Amino acid sequence: MKLPRRQFLHLAAGAAALLAMSHIARAQTYPSRPITLVVPFPAGGATDPLARVLVEHMKGTLGQTIVIENVAGAGGSLGVGRVARAAPDGYTLSIGHTGTHVFNGATLNLQYDVMKDFEPIALLANTPQWIIARKTLPPSNLGELVAYLKANPGKASVATVGIGGGGHIAGTYFKQVTGTSFQFVPYRGGAPAIQDLVAGQVDLMFDQSANSFAQVRSGQVKVYAVLARQRWSLAPDVPTADEAGYPGIYIAYWHGLWAPKGTPKDVISKLTSAVQAALDDATVQQRFAVIGQEVWPREQRTPEALAIQQKAEIEKWWPVIKTAGIKAE
């Protein structure tokens, strides 16, 4: 049956008004039940405490409980995959980092797309990689280390957490830039790798500065350089690789927050606002600093900034990974 034009327009206007009202109602009622934040790693490490500090503040802003669910395995891809398959309603979120949302896309055969299957919420915090060594390794600075590695090709041992992780990729990139060679020794976790470095069982490690900050500060291991454009605020006496004469070796573990693809924009906006409020809080910033995490500037804590950061990192690191033929186990 063909409706008169006036009646059709009236019905269309009514439908549009109902849709607008539903968006407003959803924005006003979300969240109406507990939210699950999937941490794709075991308790401990660098990601889990960061997530717990964050949600402790966010739950006050949102007025709902946020439950941490640790879903570990396969370099974080099991937990991230669970979020990719979740309903896009804002009640299941993923925290992740350079490894889970950049490196894994090139090193693993994933059942999801690290960019296309998620809605970015906000950049959270950043910790650079640095080059650390057993304290008895002869070189005293980065220039001497490069000379030492060239004089002893393939002899130095470098601890990594598995194959295809940040340390492995940073070490591979370092080889390409400096023309050095060494042997990777994979470990099942960061703790045993650091333990062997402290004990002198391996020579070097490209590590998240947050992970080994305590060992460096206590003098159990030595540090040669931070792999960032600027010195790390928590260890300002450590030079950058740029300062040591090897510019452009930048690699960091930045954390972000994502929701499943299709999550409504008004829900994303509420979550972003809650993140902003948390990261503006001086107590949260201080607690992040204790675990070696630097908060991103406010203007970079947006969904758009997270998408730009992720895309730029993919464009930088995927060719390095694929050229080296790195495939995670």
Image (cartoon, rainbow, N blue to C red):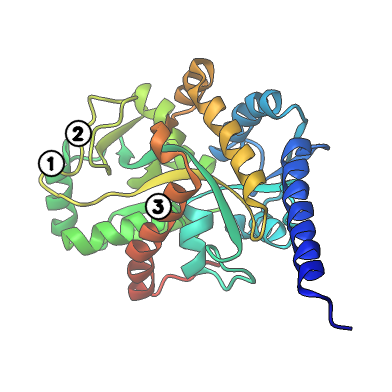
Is residue 258 visible in the rendered image? The answer is yes
Judged from the image, the secondary structure of the residue bearing numbered disc 3 is helix
Q: Looking at the image, which residue is at 36% across and 52% down?
A: 158
Residue 188, above or below 286: below
Query: Mark 3 highlights which residue?
Result: 309
Check disc 1 and give the amino acid type. Answer: Ala
Residue in the foreground of this view, choosing between 105 and 270:
270
The quarter of the image holding the N terminus is: bottom right
At x 61%, y 64%, the residue is 117
Secondary structure of residue under mark 2: loop
Q: How far from the left and from the top, in percent, is residue 65?
A: 78, 31
Q: Circle 1 — which element?
A: loop
CA neighbours of label 1 inside 10 A, class few (<14), some (14 to 19), many (20+): some
Hey, what amino acid is under mark 3?
A: Gln
Give how far across and how far down residue 163 sits, in percent.
48, 62
Judging depth in this view, the residue of 267 and 319 nearest the camera is: 267
| Front of the two marks 3 and 1 | 3
CA–CA distance in space, label 3 to label 1? 26 Å
Q: Nearer the viewer, mark 3 or mark 2?
A: 3
Label at residue 244 = 1
* Distance (Cα) linking label 1 and label 2: 7 Å
Q: Report x, y in % for residue 201.
A: 40, 45
79 vs 244: above or below: below
Disc 2: which residue: 239
Q: Residue at x 44, y 29 (%)?
A: 292
Q: Quadrant of the C terminus?
A: bottom right
Q: Residue at x 71, y 47 (%)?
A: 90
View extreme (top): residue? 283
Position of 227 compared to 27: left or right? Answer: left
Identify the image quadrant of residue 139: top left
Quick one: which residue is furthest to the bottom in this view? Answer: 1
Q: Are marks 3 and 1 in contact (CB under 8 Å)?
A: no
